[in-house]
């Protein structure tokens, strides 16, 4: 009997082992691998091209406005400053000339600027019978040289005018016309060794009779072999 039971047990062992292996295979099967790519949504990366715009800015350099003196160009000037304020004068004369000249020179160049006021030029009655003579004279009104003489018709035609201009705390005359004249050297040859005061004068005549004038003065002195001129204007 015991032998029979042992035989049966021996027969049942392979059956039990087979059944256990079948269950283990069923529950331990690895996950299936598909060849189809995964359709899981991937995050979208947005790349934005950033364009840098360079704007060219014009650089403006502002220079401070300053009043500078005229350069030392070897010239003297007079008559351009409106001394005592902007008073309207019927006729004004101003000059520019070398500050020094040789006594051996035949003549000296002198630039004269001259003209009447706009109000005078635009008023026909004020010019009736008017004539102007530009001269060089001494303090006692001795005539040294006559530059030119002209009438109202020439003044209108060639615009012999001036305008007063105010700049900060100063005033000056701006002329529309200038001329260069040659003055003989003998005019400035004084017998005296002392400096003398001379005048550029615009003499105004009405119907042949003098009625007004305007003068600009300067100093003249002989120093060695040179004639030295000095302006009374700053």
Image (cartoon, rainbow, N blue to C red):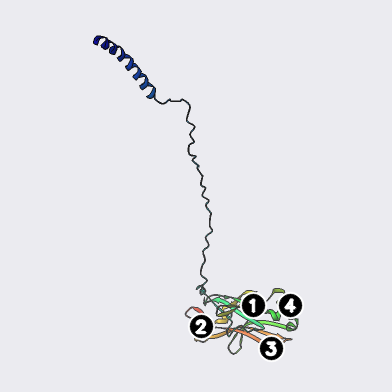
Q: Residue at x 65, y 86 (%)?
A: 213
Q: Which residue is mark 4?
A: 153
x then y, percent, for residue 192: 51, 87
Label 2: few (<14), some or many (≥20) within 10 Å? many
The mark lying in front, picked from 3 and 2, is 3
Give the camera-side residue of 165 and 45.
Answer: 45
Give the Cα distance between marks 3 and 1: 22 Å
The mark lying in front, picked from 2 and 1, is 1
Image side of residue 197 versus residue 119, left or right: left
The mark lying in front, picked from 2 and 4, is 4
- Residue 163: which numbered mark, if any? 1
Q: Which residue is mark 3?
A: 211
Give the camera-side residue of 53 and 78.
Answer: 53
- Residue 221: which numbered mark, if any? 2
Give the Cα distance between marks 2 and 4: 38 Å
Question: Tag 2's secondary structure?
Answer: strand
Q: Residue at x 72, y 74 (%)?
A: 157
Q: Residue at x 33, y 14 (%)?
A: 15
For the N terminus, give its image quadrant: top left
Question: Tag 3's secondary structure?
Answer: strand
Give the camera-side residue of 42 and 46.
Answer: 42
Q: Which of the marked residues, 2 or 1, is nearer the chain's N terminus?
A: 1
Give the Cα distance between marks 3 and 2: 32 Å
Label 3: few (<14), some or many (≥20) within 10 Å? few
């Amino acid at each position: 009997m015991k032998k029979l039971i042992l035989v049966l047990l021996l027969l049942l062992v392979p059956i039990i082992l087979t059944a256990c292996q079948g269950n283990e295979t069923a529950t331990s099967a690895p996950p299936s691998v598909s060849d189809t790519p995964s359709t899981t949504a991937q995050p979208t990366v947005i790349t934005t091209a950033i364009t840098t715009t360079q704007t060219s800015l014009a650089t403006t350099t502002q220079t401070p406005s300053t009043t500078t003196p005229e350069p030392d160009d070897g010239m003297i000037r007079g008559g351009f400053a409106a001394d005592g304020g902007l008073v309207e004068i019927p006729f004004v004369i101003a000059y520019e000339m070398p500050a020094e000249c040789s006594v051996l020179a035949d003549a000296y160049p002198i630039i004269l600027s001259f003209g009447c006021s706009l109000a005078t030029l635009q008023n026909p009655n004020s010019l009736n019978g008017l004539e102007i003579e530009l001269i060089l004279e001494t303090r006692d009104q001795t005539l040294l040289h006559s530059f030119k003489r002209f009438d109202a018709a020439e003044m209108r035609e060639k615009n012999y005018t001036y305008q007063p201009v105010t700049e900060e705390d100063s005033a000056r005359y701006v002329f529309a016309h200038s001329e260069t004249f040659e003055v003989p050297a003998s005019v400035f040859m004084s017998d005296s060794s002392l400096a003398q005061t001379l005048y550029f004068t615009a003499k105004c005549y009405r119907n042949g009779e003098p009625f007004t004038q305007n003068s600009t003065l300067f100093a003249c002195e002989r120093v060695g072999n040179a004639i030295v001129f000095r302006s009374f204007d700053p």
